[in-house]
Each structure stands twice: as C-alpha cells, then as structure tokens.
Image (cartoon, rainbow, N blue to C red):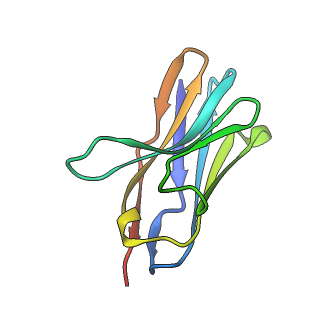
C-alpha cells in the first residue's frame, strides 16, 4: 500500500514563499509521475505542477514563473517551491503520484496567503 504525506503548508503573506513536500512510502514501484494539484471549495481539482519520469515538467499557467517542482528520487519525495504567492493561491494542495498503473493522492495541505 502506498501513502503520500504532504507537509509545508501554512499561512504566508502576499509575496511570500512556501515549500511543500510530499513523501511517498509503502510498496513503491516505478514512480511514473509525481506532482501537485489544488482544489478550491466548489471547484474542480486543478493541476499545479507535475514532473514525469525523465524530468519533464508541466505547470499550470498560474504557476509558471513562480512555482518550481523538483524530486528527490532517492527519498521518493517531491517538492513544490512556491514564490511570489498571491491571495488567489489560497486553497488545499494535494500531492499526486502515478505509481505503476495506479493513481495515488495525499490528504492535502492548506495554503493560506493573507495579510
């Protein structure tokens, strides 16, 4: 069984930075993709950033130039460095991983951008 555990969320002022972490544990095979989605109340879950095996990345337009995804393959951990945060970035962020033929999700971590 695979578990994804996020950390690093919290309250930050506009223009500030946060670094989210997502550690995968359990019966981990090949991690084909790992990344972050977010979901605001009443809205669909949307992609923030994704790293596919081989290092290719995909970012939402709203994240480009501000957010950077990275992975430590030895630790089965993904990171999302978020800079220049805006109030509209406030929501719950979910870690996602495609391992083998299965999709896994973390429980989410709250990010609040407010003065």
Using the image, determine if residue 93 lies above or below residue 16.
above
Of residues 68 and 5, which is closer to you in this image? Answer: 68
Q: Quadrant of residue 71?
A: top right
Question: How many numbered marks appear?
Answer: 0
Residue 15, image x and y in percent?
Answer: 51, 79
Residue at the right extreme, as displayed:
74
Of residues 1 and 56, which is closer to you in this image? Answer: 56
Q: Residue at x 69, y 22 (%)?
A: 30
Q: Residue at x 50, y 51 (%)?
A: 61
Residue 10, image x and y in percent?
Answer: 45, 68
Residue at the left extreme, as displayed:
42
Using the image, determine if residue 84 lies above or below residue 13.
above
Residue 14, image x and y in percent?
Answer: 45, 79
Q: Residue at x 36, y 66 (%)?
A: 88
Q: Residue at x 51, y 19 (%)?
A: 102
Residue at the bottom extreme, as displayed:
115
Q: Tell whether 60 sits left or right of 40.
A: right
Quadrant in which the C terminus appears: bottom left
Residue 87, image x and y in percent?
Answer: 37, 71
Q: Tell whether 76 sits left or right of 85.
A: right
Residue at the top extreme, as displayed:
101
Of residues 45 and 23, which is closer to you in this image? Answer: 45
């Amino acid at each position: 069984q695979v578990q994804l555990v996020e950390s690093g969320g919290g309250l930050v002022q506009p223009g500030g930075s946060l670094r989210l972490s997502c550690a995968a544990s359990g019966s981990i095979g090949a991690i084909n993709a790992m990344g972050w989605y977010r979901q605001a109340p009443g809205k669909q879950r949307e992609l923030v950033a994704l790293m596919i095996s081989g290092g290719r990345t995909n970012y939402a337009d709203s994240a480009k130039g501000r957010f950077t995804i990275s992975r430590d393959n030895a630790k089965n951990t993904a990171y999302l460095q978020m800079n220049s945060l805006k109030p509209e970035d406030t929501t719950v962020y979910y870690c996602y991983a495609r391992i083998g033929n299965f999709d896994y999700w973390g429980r989410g971590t709250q990010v609040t951008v407010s003065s």
